[in-house]
Image (tube, rainbow, N blue to C red):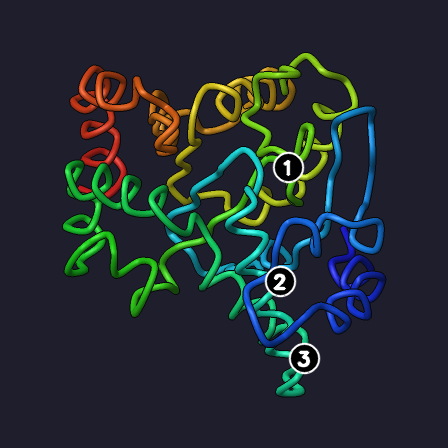
Amino acid sequence: MGHATEWDTYKQAICSLPADRPLTKEEALTDALLMRRFGQVEMYYAPHNEYVNHEARVVIIGITPGWTQMQIALEAARKGLEQQLNEKEIWKRAKAEARFAGAMRRNLISMLDELELHRYLGVSSSEALFREEGELLHTTSALKYPVFVGKQNYTGSRPPLATTPYLRELAMGFMRSELSAFPHALLIPLGRAVEDLLQEMDRENGIDRGRILWGFPHPSGANGHRHRQFAEGAERMGGVLKRLFG
């Protein structure tokens, strides 16, 4: 997939965004950044998933960027354009600032620390993967660009990602392309919706199931079951890390 094409299409719209204050949804979720619409389901452009860290040893896969990630990525890109940075540097900065930003990142780091992923990677904490040890981590989403339903974050369930043809085809096409760059990395799918897509990829062509943390909960604060889900799978997931890195 050619990453620069979408950036070139929406770069001018990003340049036109307000630069003196935080973006609002009304300013960002407009036709100028709209990529696709299927009834109430809308996909908008954000640039942070254009950047791919090919050196990563860990790949975390979310469902789709939410509003917080989109807002931060657009603001970072707007600033980078003002500074006349090249596109790759803009994408990289947007990725570093936006990926799983907010409470979701804190919840994610907490679970990764409990599994002691940082110890296997030889770094001080899982938080370091989002900061000074960022070369070890690649983050991405099954749906590369932000998807909203009725202007609210899409959670992968309504409509169901795995059984809604237009969403499933977009997600599968992107994941086949993206994950082919990481034949040996640890894969962490966030939640059941992403797991279902990896299961389908396995049925299609086979994947190394032993490098996937099956059962890792989605870290969103809206997932009230995440603590129970994590506790149920922690021993099994710890075994995967020990086999892969130990």
Seen from the viewer's position, the closer of residues 31 and 60 is 31
Horizontal side of 139 relative to 15 (left or right) equals left
- Left or right: 150 in relation to 208: right
Quadrant hosting residue 15: bottom right
**Residue 145 seen by the camera:** yes
Q: Which residue is mark 2?
A: 74
Q: Which residue is mark 3?
A: 81
Which of the two discs, 2 and 1, labels the residue nearer the N terminus?
Answer: 2
Q: Residue furthest top?
A: 163
Q: Quadrant of the C terminus?
A: top left
Compared with 200, 2 (above or below) is: below
For marks 2 and 3, the one nearer the N-term is 2
Left or right: where 172 falls relative to 64: right
Compute the Cα span from label 3 to label 1: 25 Å
Q: Which mark is residue 143?
A: 1
Instruction: Give the foreground label among 2 and 1.
Output: 2
Instruction: Name the residue: 62% across, 62% down.
Output: 74
Name the outermost residue toward the bottom: 83
Measured in 3D between alpha carbons, the distance from the residue under mark 2 to the one under mark 3, in whole angstroms, is: 10 Å
Look at the numbered discs 3 and 1 and tell me whether their residues touch, using CB distance below 8 Å: no
Image coords of residue 47 (percent x, y)? 65, 59
Of the residues shown, which amino acid type is indicated by label 2? Leu
**Which secondary structure, mark 1?**
loop
Give the amino acid type for the residue marked by disc 3 in the picture: Leu
Residue 211 appears in the figure: no
